[in-house]
Amino acid sequence: MQTTKPNTPQIPTFTTVEEERLHRQQRLAAAFRLFSRFGFDEGVAGHITARDPENPEHFWVNPFGMHFGLIRVSDLILVNHEGEVIHGNRPVNRAAFAIHSQVHAARPDVIAAAHAHSIYGKSWSSLGRLLDPLTQDACAFYQNHSLFDDYTGVVLDPKEGRRIAQTLGNNKAMILKNHGLLTVGHSIDEAAWWFITMERSCQAQLLAEAAGQPSPIKPEYASLTQSQVGSRELGWFSFQPLYEMIVRQEPDLLN
């Protein structure tokens, strides 16, 4: 892994709440466009949330029933801690509120959370197993992801969301058995990147096990690699090329 140089992009800081809010909205809209680009959309399922910098108990989220590939900054809605839409004129996905409100409440350090019914993530989730450290990329989740193994239907009750949040603990990601993946981050960039690379890690392990008996990385090296590729800084940095690409190709997302 190459180390970053002083002239590489750095995690930004802000002088006003308005500036930080716009930044989060832009990154959130870009994350939805990227999820669409990667095929993580499945009908009306899936959601990414971001705390509001002024009111941290409120979060920005996608409107229920709007395609990820169409979402712009102006389409995002703001939801309070009771699930009421306080900005925007479209409804919120009840499952988004039930899960994400509890994750945000349990993890004050988390700025963003991402969940979708991506094909390899939900396929892997049906096995009821954690990911193995089969590749360098998968090591980002080594001893840093959880398994929620009690599927009881669509999550509409915040009490169920609370159980999910408790199972997540202090980890960056979780496999929801028979459901899909959930990732969190200290920025939208980080949460979105962990989801993208976790989905690919699920794909890689499914392919490897279909082809034969994969050989995992030894625990001591998996732990070392986790410290190298699994930091919040690298998670943020890994998202930057994708953000630049999607904004250049689909600039209307910033509207």
Image: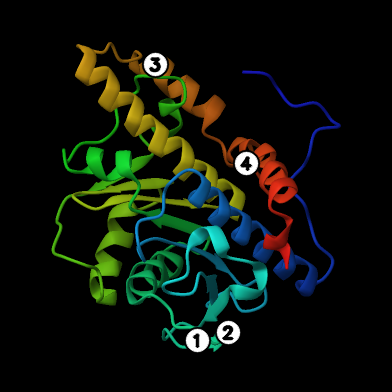
> In terms of depth relative to the viewer, which is nearer, 154 or 75?
75
Quadrant housing the C terminus: bottom right
Residue at horizontal 78%, vertical 56%? 13
Taking the image as shown, residue 132 lies to the left or right of residue 149, namely: right
> In terms of depth relative to the viewer, which is nearer, 50 or 225?
50
The three-letter amino acid code for the residue at tag 2 is Gly
Q: Residues within 10 Å of mark 3 (few under 14, many from 20)?
A: few
Question: What residue sits right under mark 1 in the picture?
Answer: 85
Upstream in sequence: badge 4 or badge 3: 3
Q: Residues within 10 Å of mark 1 (few under 14, many from 20)?
A: many
- Callout 1 touching callout 2 (CB < 8 Å): yes
- Callout 3 touching callout 1 (CB < 8 Å): no
User: Does 244 sit above or below residue 252?
Assistant: above
- Callout 4 touching callout 3 (CB < 8 Å): no
Upstream in sequence: badge 2 or badge 4: 2
User: Does 220 sit above or below residue 92?
Assistant: above
- Callout 2 touching callout 4 (CB < 8 Å): no
- Callout 4 touching callout 1 (CB < 8 Å): no
Task: Find numbered disc 1 in the image and state the secondary structure of the residue it sits on.
Answer: strand
Q: Residues within 10 Å of mark 2 (few under 14, many from 20)?
A: some
The x, y position of residue 150, in whole percent, is 14, 56
The three-letter amino acid code for the residue at tag 3 is Glu
Upstream in sequence: badge 3 or badge 1: 1
Q: How many marks?
A: 4
